[in-house]
Image (cartoon, rainbow, N blue to C red):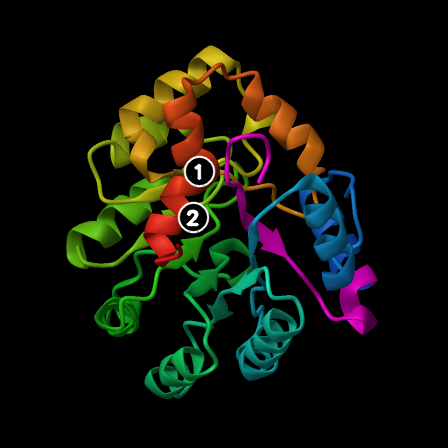
Amino acid sequence: MIGQFRVYDAHAHIFPGKIAARAVESIAEFYTLDMAFDGLPHQLDEINRAAGIDGTLVFSAATVPHQVRTINDFIAAKCEKYPHFIGMGCLHPKMDGIPQEIERIRALGLHGIKFHPDFQNFDIDDPAFLPMYREIAANRLPVMFHMGDKRYDHSRPWRLANLLEKVPDLIAIAAHYGGYSHWEEVRRCLKGSSAWYDTSSSLAFMPAEYFRELGYELGIDRLLFGTDYPMWNVHDELKRFEMLGLPDEDKAKVLGGNFERLFGIG
């Protein structure tokens, strides 16, 4: 709780200690951005508890199929160790045994599935993966998509719009306000869709007026606060969010109420 608001961080990456430094360095090189933190679960737990965060959605993407089971076991174990963590599993679209791993994700108590199309090298709307999405939708598991990058075409907003037309019951969270560096395309393609959004890696890159305008166009009832740990500092992100000047009713939704409704918390 921060002041009168319950607050959830809807976007945080964590890594095992033995690979965290290498993983964070790779992300920093990929995006040519400095990382604020180390990607370690205990560090995230300490930071968010100190900041008054009520819960944190944690995940990691599998860059190759054989990583999937190990990552899902790791996320589940860290959620058991840190009770305020809420875990998402992962899949790789090119792996074998997807229905069985979805069943295992549910058995592990994980609350959704994370994809990073740019790291995993696949198009969001590839017709070959529609059976996978339909299986996920049938299990009512929210899907977090990394969205947007000027260098790649895999995670463009128009691709998610195509997917949601074909699998309308998929619960999709379009990270980075629907598409990092493609926000006008988000407005054109995803306005009026069923997609959810988070604020991660977007607050620092647009004027407050533009952010507010886009938020109300897309749907303030489907917007989630997120930090993109280990990339950004939660205190800085909260300050940026406060500068938006949203009414208290809408602050309460974005900071916590929407998250609780999406994930059935509270």
The residue identified by callout 1 is: 179
The answer to whether the residue labelled 2 contacts the one labelled 1, judged by CB atoms less than 8 Å apart, is: yes
Left/right of residue 137 with respect to residue 52 in the rendered view: left
Cα distance between the residues tagged 2 and 1: 8 Å
Q: Is residue 209 above or below residue 75?
A: above
Q: Residues within 10 Å of mark 2 (few under 14, many from 20)?
A: many
Q: Secondary structure at mark 1?
A: loop
Left/right of residue 228 with respect to residue 88 in the rendered view: right
Query: Which is nearer the eye, 181 or 101?
Result: 101
Q: Residue 98 at what x, y percent from top left?
A: 37, 82
Q: Is residue 136 above or below residue 115?
A: below
- Residue 17 drawn in magenta: yes
Q: Which numbered mark, 2 or 1, is in the foreground of this view?
A: 1
The residue segment tinted magenta is 1-21
The residue identified by callout 2 is: 155
Q: Residue furthest top?
A: 209
